[in-house]
């Protein structure tokens, strides 16, 4: 395969990883075309979060290769700091700076890392906040926001770096049920912009709605990969059928 193909944003080839004696990823391979949303689902401990964290080298790998837009992530000599500026990550932890106002949380990295002029960074930050329904929160400290609002600020902060790829790692798992919808709505809107997205989630109905492809993992392996209509209607493996039965009956 041509790993520099313009049609592929992320290429994962034969990736394996151990935590001590525990094999958490086992010969995983998947290609993510540009401008698609791939949903990674499966039981807890399946390796989903570990896999997406290897894409920006927050987790190392024991074997295999990963390319992001033609760059070999784990190759010696790869500038990981530069690569990570092109990959937005939103996880269940908001990791906002409590001593900085929302606007400053969002503009810090574009100014310090990418050298954006302050006025330009602030203009983009305010536009992002407005697009996420937070236009009136720029001068507020994060501690004055709800969990759902903080997570949307975290999304704005990631987007402020103008990434080529967004990774969402269980972005709603730390939220109360009434706050989940506002974050899912924000991700839904982002999916419509055409940015490439990797989404780890337990929100099955949401994954079915916005994903171009569902990747089902269990035991550190990809057991199924299919369009959502096909996967949810006709899962091929018994493990996937059991998982969906448990999740959709909640």
Image: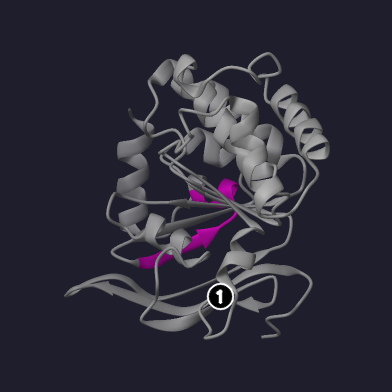
The residue lying toward the viewer, choosing from 166 and 94, is 94
**Considering the numbered disc 1 on the image, is that residue within a helix, a strand or a loop?**
loop
Quadrant location of the C terminus in the rendered image: top left
Image-based side of 41 in relation to 20, left or right: right
Task: Residue 210: tell me if it is visible.
Answer: no
How is colour applied across the structure in the image?
one colour
- Residue drawn at point x = 56 percent, y = 70 percent: 80
Image-based side of 168 in relation to 192, left or right: left
How many dots with numbers?
Answer: 1
Q: Which residues are magenta?
A: 221-231
Residue 210 in the image: above or below residue 8: above
Q: Which residue is mark 1?
A: 73
Q: Position of residue 95 (x, y in %)?
A: 44, 38
- Residue drawn at point x = 65 percent, y = 77 percent: 71
The residue lying toward the viewer, choosing from 25 and 61, is 61
Quadrant location of the N terminus in the rendered image: bottom right
Q: Residue furthest left?
A: 21
Q: Position of residue 163 (x, y in %)?
A: 69, 53
- Residue drawn at point x = 73 percent, y = 80 percent: 4
Answer few, some or many: residues within 10 Å of disc 1's Cα (few below 14, many 20 plus, some between 14 and 19): many
Residue 40 in the image: above or below residue 108: below
Q: Position of residue 54 (x, y in %)?
A: 45, 66
Q: Is residue 30 magenta?
A: no
The residue lying toward the viewer, choosing from 206 and 238, is 206
Q: Position of residue 167 (x, y in %)?
A: 55, 51
Residue 13 in the image: above or below residue 87: below
Task: Residue 85: tell me if it is visible.
Answer: yes
Residue 36 in the image: above or below residue 91: below
């Amino acid at each position: 395969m041509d790993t520099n193909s313009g049609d592929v944003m992320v290429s994962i080839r034969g990736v394996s990883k151990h935590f001590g004696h525990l094999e958490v990823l086992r010969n995983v391979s998947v290609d993510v075309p540009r401008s698609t949303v791939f949903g990674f689902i499966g039981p807890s401990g399946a390796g989903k979060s570990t896999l997406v964290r290897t894409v920006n080298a927050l987790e190392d790998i024991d074997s295999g290769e990963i390319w992001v837009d033609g760059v070999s992530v784990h190759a010696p000599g790869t500038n990981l700091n530069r690569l990570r500026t092109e990959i937005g990550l939103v996880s269940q932890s908001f990791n906002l700076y409590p001593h900085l106002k929302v606007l400053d949380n969002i503009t810090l990295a574009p100014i310090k890392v990418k050298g954006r002029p302050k006025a330009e960074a602030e203009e983009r930050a305010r536009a992002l906040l407005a697009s996420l329904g937070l236009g009136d929160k720029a001068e507020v400290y994060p501690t004055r926001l709800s969990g759902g609002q903080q997570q949307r600020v975290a999304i704005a902060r990631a987007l402020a770096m103008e990434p080529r790829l967004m990774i969402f790692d269980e972005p709603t798992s730390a939220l109360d049920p009434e706050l989940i919808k506002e974050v899912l709505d924000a991700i839904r809107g982002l999916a419509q912009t055409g940015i490439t997205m990797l989404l780890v989630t337990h929100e099955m109905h949401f994954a079915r709605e916005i994903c171009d492809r569902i990747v089902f993992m269990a035991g550190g392996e990809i057991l199924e990969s299919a369009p959502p209509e096909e996967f949810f209607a006709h899962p091929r493996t018994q493990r996937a059928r059991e998982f969906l039965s448990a999740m959709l009956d909640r």
